Amino acid sequence: MIKFLLFLKKLRSNLIKLSLDKAEYKSSYNNLTMHLNVNSNCNAKCKFCELRKQPTKELSDVILYEYLLPLYPKTDVVVPTYGEYTISSKVYNYLTWLMEKFPHINLLTETNGINFNEKWQEFSADNLVRTSCSLNAINAKRYQETVWEGEGGEAAYTKTINNLRNYQKLLKEKGLEDFGTRLSMVLTPDNYCDIPEFVRLALELNSCFVTLFFDVYNLDIINTPKRPLVERALDTLLELDTLLRGHFFLFYKLYTPFDSKFISERKKQLKLSKEELKEKYKDIWELAQYRNIKEEYKRRTEIRNKQGKAPISFLRELTITGSQYILNGKDVDFCTLPWDHLLLTTEGYVNICSWYCNTKVRRPHISEFVKDGKLDSDALFNSVFYKYQRHNMKTKKYVGCMKNCPYKNAEFKKYYTSLINS
């Protein structure tokens, strides 16, 4: 009986491989985005983050400098992420080497800002880095109350704000104001009331745009008595989105506990008048009214082109991982991440997306595609693992994808690209 079951399992596996051996599931892996979990170290103590409970690890030099070497010429974007990259001299040396050897690559980084010092500010400005900062609070007092575990939160926030203001000044001196830091805040019941003030602060700091997302570890909050609080927070986001559309980008549809249909219906119920919102959020409107998303993106693109950077769409610089809904130069209506995206964990395991959480699918290690010390890129990107994910996306079987991920819906692309195409 056991032998028969093993036979059936092997037969099923072979049938799956045969069904995936089609041209439509293969990739030439051009214009790659590489999402590299360079380290798991962090110098912050955020209440809602699980990272500091994880073992400290770093992506090995062999992977960064040797295995990935044949992929860099085909890569448009590298995202050094997961831990706090600014506290690692190893990561600084790697990124400096990467920019010297492959200056066409766009770097998109994520920092808590505490150690975003002069060295990192100069590096970021000189290399046109799209820098994101998880600021998470409107002032030092609220940071200590709503974000930081234990003592030291106010001092950490003060250091971060000073770094951001110094970087804002540096960008202005270099004529790079349009590369202002993207600020983000994790939304919890403790800080829903701070949403407008956080947006105002982001505008004051000349942020490129702002991201507000609900605590990923507490998305079931809408099934608790706190649901009315969450709905009011969503109403605030919808109001600000309506007010700022075309002027300043507000990204909030990731990690939301509500699906797209609920959000659309809620927006209709609010019957939002832009003139009323200008009065309600007068201080925000005064800071945003002369800004223009389309023109700012255009100027960033011109500067990147002069510096020899690979082309990067507004949607791509906005979301880091977001699907472009473009395959072989044509618009499609499914997530295309498995065709042009590589994520590596600190241990070197392969994934298609940082928001793909299917633990039942075996994730290969990058070393499995190395022969005689060199990466077999074709074997990696056209492995059964990748082709299986492509099949799922093309047939819209989003097995293991993050709950309510907006990239499942092609309307996401239409909405955000319309901001710069209108």
Image (tube, rainbow, N blue to C red):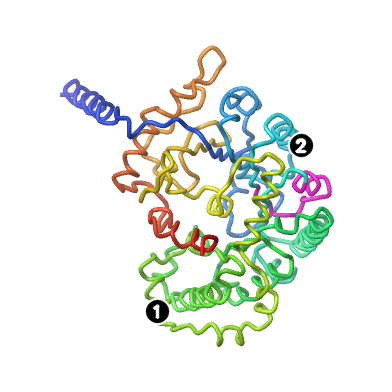
Residue at left offset 29%, top offset 31% = 20
Residue 322: image x %, image y %? Answer: 49, 50
Q: Nearer the viewer, residue 50 or 244?
A: 244
Q: What is the crowding at mark 1: few (fewer than 14 residues within 10 Å), some, or many (at least 20)? A: few
Q: Amino acid at mark 2?
A: Ser
Q: Position of residue 239 (x, y in %)?
A: 52, 78
SS at badge 1: helix
- Classify the position of the N terminus by image quarter: top left
Amino acid under label 1? Answer: Lys
Who is closer to the viewer here, 227 or 262? 262
First to last magenta residue range: 109-125
Within the magenta stretch, is there residue 75? no
In the figure, 298 relative to 340: above or below? below
Nearer-the-camera pick, 394 or 349 = 394
Q: Is residue 89 above or below residue 355?
A: above
Element carrying mark 2: helix
2 or 1: tag closer to the N-terminus = 2
Task: Inspect this view and state whether residue 90 appears.
Answer: yes
Q: Give the image location of residue 56, x and y in percent.
A: 64, 39
> Residue 275 occupies which quadrant of the picture?
bottom right
Which residue position holds label 1? 268
Pick whichever, 93 or 9, lies toward us. 93
Q: Is residue 319 left or right of residue 225?
A: right
Residue found 71% across the figure and 33% down from its top = 94
**Distance in Å between CA atoms under marks 2 and 1:** 50 Å
| Residue 132 left/right relative to 342 | right
Q: Which residue is mark 2?
A: 89
